Amino acid sequence: METSKAIHLLKCHAYAQDDTDLPKVSGGFLGSLRPFRGELKEENFHEMMIVIRALAAKLGEPALDREMIACLWSICKLGRAWAVEPEGMLRSNDLMTDEQVERMENWLDLISYAVMILLDDGGEEEAFWGYREYVSEQLAPLMAELDDLLPEKALEAEIQELHGEYKERTGADEERLAAFEAKFEVLLPEDFRSFYRLKDGSGYAFHIIYTGDAAMDECIPFYLMSLDEMEKTKSYFCERDELLAQYYSAEEIQRLAPEIKPYLFHKQWVPFATMAGGSLYLMLDLDPSDQGTYGQVISYVHDPDFVYYVAGSFTGLLRESNRNLSLMDEIEY
């Protein structure tokens, strides 16, 4: 993420943009609290953490950007004053549950700790260790659920063999993840990194991700590529920027989900899953529109070529995929 983009997102979440009608401002970290509509937006917290990671170098500079610090201070101070303090506007009016208060306090602790460590030049590993534990704990039940579903749904001998190979599959270490990010100048979402630390893909043709709606018998199977496969794919797919306007009329482009910028191919899209023998990809969108969220999952469908919104995060994708898999009779090859 470029520094200018990170600053833009930070100002949105701190309600510090001149245009407060932007969806990312009114629905951002602070904007969503005033007025509070009953829901804490988990995606705002994760986007804040990726913004802080993108600004790590700037937070370590001898001369600090006053606007950047003011935004970070506002988020920590006002977030706590409005949502955590007993006399704050949300708690004093019984607008938040005890669980929401606890969750917000945890988010603010993780944000302030990361900023404190980076200001003290303590390094990213220390700054984000708590956040990584938080994400890992969130992902663990979904991975455990997947591990329970796979042997139940792997009925054919060929699929059982692929499942056996999957169980032996190892994860990618931090050095490998960092090398991928450096090569493509991206920051991978932490939930994706957390999954790949345990499993570096699922293996060719072992479809463990299912988008769509199994209840309507409308599911599309995908297998997770390894980081090596992702690198190879990125060398010929989404290695360039091409706008939809080069291929489609304005009327046709209106079909695009508002969370997605109007590209057909984009260097900030990272394909990570595909269908064996098919021309479909699931991608991490690392440059969403102001109505989207960093790290949202989108899909590319070939013939006719177009891009579709799938889920707000890798975690959301896995949750929906597990639901679909639980309703299916067996894993498809």
Image (cartoon, grey):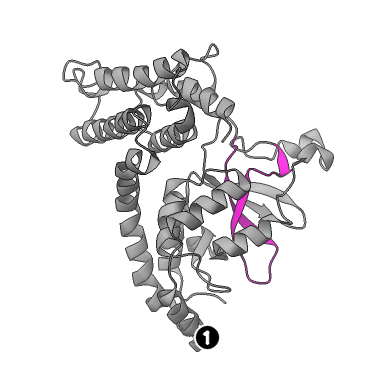
Looking at the image, which residue is at 62% across and 47% down? Answer: 184
Q: Nearer the viewer, residue 297 or 119?
A: 119
Judge whether residue 59 is colored magenta. no
Residue at left offset 67%, top offset 60%:
233
Which quadrant of the figure contains the C terminus? bottom right
The residue most toward the bottom is 157
Disc 1 designates what residue? Answer: 158
Q: Secondary structure at mark 1?
A: helix
* Residue 161, horizontal then vertical, whole percent: 48, 84
Q: Tag 1: Cα neighbours inside 10 Å, few (<14), some, or many (≥20)?
A: few
Give residue 302's quadrant in the image: bottom right
Would residue 173 be seen by someone viewing this image from the given angle?
yes
Q: How many marks?
A: 1
Q: Please tell me which residue is depicted at 21% across the width and 37% down the height of the picture.
A: 99
Residue in the picture at 25% in, 15% down: 89
Q: Is residue 307 above or below residue 64?
A: below
Name the quadrant containing residue 111: top left
- Which is more toward the observer, 90 or 197? 197
Q: Quadrant of residue 254?
A: top right
Q: Looking at the picture, how far across and down is residue 80, in whole percent?
A: 26, 22
In percent of width and height, residue 141 lies at 31, 58
Tell me which segment is drawn in magenta: 262-288
Q: Is residue 274 magenta?
A: yes
Which residue in the rendered view is the most extreme toward the left?
86
Amino acid at dot 1: Glu
Q: Is 318 rendered above or below residue 205?
A: above
Image quadrant occupied by the N terminus:
top right
